[in-house]
Image: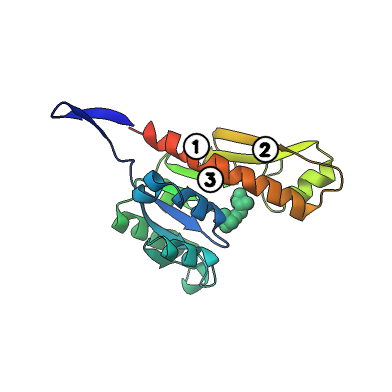
Amino acid sequence: MTDRVVGGAAVDRALPPFAILASGRGSNLAAICSHDDLRAACVGVIVSSHAAAAARRAADVGLPVATVTRADLPSRSDFDAALAAQLGSWGASWVVLAGFMHILGDAVLDAFPRRVVNIHPSLLPAFPGLHPHRQALAAGVSESGCTVHLVVPGAVDGGPIVAQSAVPVVAGDDEESLAARVLAAEHDLYPRTLRALLTTDG
Ligand code: GAR
């Protein structure tokens, strides 16, 4: 975004700081961070498993990584409080869920109202929750895709839809082939949707 003039020359305004939360492979994290402007605005990555490959992906691009696992903490509210504390210490103003397989509690959602964003591998409201590709194939749909949405309390894979990208379901598809096609769409959709959200923030 070019919206500020200093000494007569337009300069780019940095995007607001965001943190990424991931639980597993981290391919969406890598796709986001392959864009220099988004990488520059990312203040850190929280992984929810000691085994998450996402931690290596984050370290590879020089991002701070914190591991916050539910199993290491006595209660769900302690988990949420630990997430909120880490996000606060990094000065994040947005939270980007990229394969984060936990439902966020009020401690995080209240601290970032309408500033938590998620990607889900289906065309919501169809096929929320687990195994969306299995659900899509069982339903016999001719297209599936991915959805970027804001996260609001009380709705798993719910909340206002920001953007969607559709892909065809083709004859002979299984969960793996459909997931791969949708994942490629995710890697295209999430970075540009995130940039649009962050650019219009505030
Ligand atoms: C992605 O397909 C993402 O849409 C999905 O988890 C995968 C994470 O892959 N998220 C959900 O299902 C959320 N309900 P990644 O770790 O390689 O980015």
Q: Is mark 3 within 8 Å of ligand 1?
A: yes
Q: Which residue is mark 1?
A: 193
**Which residue is identified by label 3?**
118
**Mark closer to the chain start, 1 or 3:** 3
Distance between mark 2 and mark 1 Cα atoms: 15 Å
Which quadrant of the figure has residue 149? top right
First in residue order: circle 2 vs circle 1: 2
Q: Earlier in the sequence, mark 2 or mark 3?
A: 3
Q: Residue at x 48, y 49 (%)?
A: 32
Name the residue at the front extreme.
9
Residue nearer the viewer, 152 or 170:
170
Q: Residues within 10 Å of mark 2 (few under 14, many from 20)?
A: many
Q: Secondary structure at mark 3?
A: strand
Query: How far across and down, in percent of the image, does residue 23 sit?
Result: 54, 61
User: Residue 7, labelled with which disc?
Assistant: none
- CB of mark 1 within 8 Å of CB of mark 3? no
Query: Is label 2 or label 1 in front?
Result: 1
Quarter where residue 6 is shown: top left
